[in-house]
Image: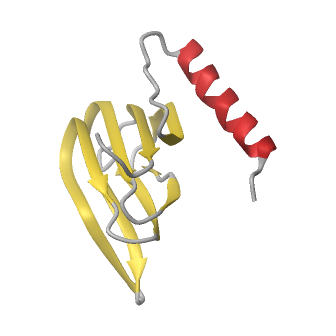
Amino acid sequence: PYNSQAMRTSSHTILLAQLLVPGLVVADNVLQLQERRLNLAAGGIEQPCFTMQAEQRLEYSFESSAPVDLNLHYREDGDIEFPVTLEAVTGEDGVYISPKNRDYCLMWTNRSADPVSLEYSYQLLQPGPE
């Protein structure tokens, strides 16, 4: 069923993101948008999780003040699978298309002995032309 409250909340979130981030262009097919700035403690992790449907597109980007590890992972049959794995990088822009319905997590890990400034964003897009 149509959930008008959820649609209003989603629209307000996207409008607020556009107001807070000058130049941000949010397409009509965005299902979820997340942006965050934080200090990642020494040895710390940041791990936003979300559900993707088959053929949905994840677009992500980040920048950090020092190298961090990034992965995209999910659990299947008791195992953890890693469709995206990057080690010791200070930024990346990427795209991932889910082959089937499942829950995913993006995870940044600070392996250094010092805090790291991390700024990231991701959006989930409904299937369709790019």
Expressed as whole percent of the image width and height from the top left, the position of residue 56 reads: 40, 55
Give the answer, above or below, for where 37 lies relative to 103. above
Residue at x 51% of width, y 57% of height: 49
Judged from this view, the residue extending furthest toward the bottom is: 77
52 or 34: nearer the viewer: 52
Expressed as whole percent of the image width and height from the top left, the position of residue 3 reads: 77, 50
Residue at x 43% of width, y 20% of height: 25
Residue at x 47% of width, y 39% of height: 29
Quadrant of res 97: bottom left
Residue at x 36% of width, y 65% of height: 73
Quadrant of res 83: bottom left
Give the answer, above or below, for where 4 lies relative to 50. above
In this rendering, does residue 13 appear at all?
A: yes
Q: Quadrant of the C terminus?
A: top left
On the picture, is 63 further left or further right than 106? left
The scheme the figure's colours follow is secondary structure
Expressed as whole percent of the image width and height from the top left, the position of residue 115 reads: 40, 36
On the picture, is 69 further left or further right than 9? left
Judged from this view, the residue extending furthest toward the top is: 22
